[in-house]
Amino acid sequence: MSFRLNHVHVYALVHNKEVALFDTGLDISGSFDLLKKDLESIGQDIESVRVIYITHSHGDHCGMAGLIKKESEAIIHLSAAADESNRNYSQTDLLILKMKKFYLSHGLSEHQVDNTIEVFSATRNIVAQFKGDYCLQPNEIREFGAWQFESIFTPGHSNGHICYCFRKEGILLSGDTVLPHITPNLSPDLFDEDFRPLENFLASLDKVASLPVGKIYPGHGNVMGNVQARVQELHVHHAERTQLVLQCLGTTPKTAFQVALGVFGNDLPDFDKFLALNETYVHLLDLKDKGIIKEEQDGDILVYTVQ
Ligand SMILES: [Zn+2]
């Protein structure tokens, strides 16, 4: 990938001449050919893909689902929330309006919002249009050849995120819920005000930690053992982040963006400021829900104050 994450994993299960894919990679120049080549290296091809299981609706994970389906008639599985999110975020004009309203109200300037929309739109161009064929239920058991796996609903990094658990083998395909080295980015769902990214994410981590798995195959990065230790690190990270957000909020009312600059510093490109604002906002939202801070309208913008 051209983004900082550098790569995304596509996992394949093979049974006779049939393939199940878990995530698809993104639709950028060369990526479809690369997937083809990789499948050929294990004696398969795109036409052998029977089923696609998607972890979540971010473009790097589902961007090629539509292209693969075109050549193989593969059945695309995902959660109903991920399918809806994919539909919502494809409505470019509405999305731009929502982004403008949300990010201006949280303290970004017009110029910063415009730059952010430009970069964000590019991240949507990596998704070839598709819609899901089958919406998975929580803890649904699916089979492929001799393999059996279960859909574990793990919202947080994205509304509608699913991990796939192979209980017998003690393996979890974790998508972006648990990653090595980096903490999965948390951001609001602009189409669902009730979505609580941080609260959901922490609960999903506990769900993952309770699974009988010894190995995690993440969406990015290397295979991880010691699942509980990684989950604990992510909990500690967010507990510390919450404290830092409160510290940067201080005693005077501030916008989410002002707090974000305190947490992440000012020396960031516009798109990173946008990510910093998202991360800060989900912590402020959680603190607001817990009654620790309050949110008030000040003209066109929203400010936060410790209660
Ligand atoms: Zn993601």
Image (spheres, rainbow, N blue to C red):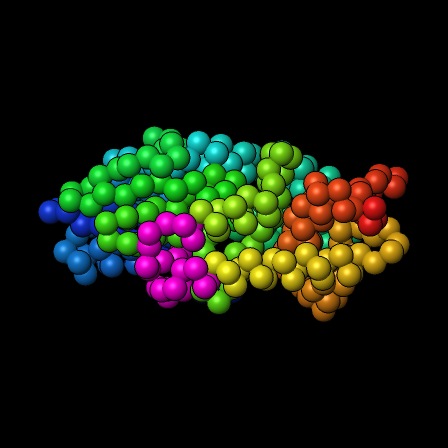
Residue farthest along the left direction in this orientation = 16
- Which quadrant: the N terminus? bottom left
Q: Nearer the viewer, residue 23 or 67?
A: 23
- The answer to if 211 sits in the magenta stretch is yes
Q: Residue at x 70, y 40 (%)?
A: 289
Residue 233 spot, x, y in % from top left: 52, 63
Q: Residue at x 78, y 46 (%)?
A: 293
| Residue at x 48% of width, y 58% of height | 231
Q: Nearer the viewer, residue 279 or 3?
A: 279
Q: Quadrant of residue 34?
A: bottom left
Q: Is residue 35 visible?
A: yes
Measuring from the top left, give residue 74's x and y in whole percent: 26, 37
97 vs 16, left or right, is right
In the image, 186 versus 86, the foreground residue is 186
Q: For residue 229, which quarter of the picture? A: bottom left
**Residue 20, x across and y down, in percent:** 24, 45
Number of residue marks: 0
Q: Which residues are magenta?
A: 208-230
Residue at (48, 50) in percent of width and height: 206
Determine whether 286 is above or below 234 in the image. above
Taking the image as shown, residue 189 lies to the left or right of residue 44, namely right
Task: Pinpoint residue 282: horizontal percent, then vertical percent.
Answer: 65, 48
Can residue 56 be spotted in the picture?
Answer: no
Report whether 190 appears left or right of 56. right
Residue 260 included in the magenta stretch of the image = no
Residue 21 vertical placement versus 5 (above, below):
above
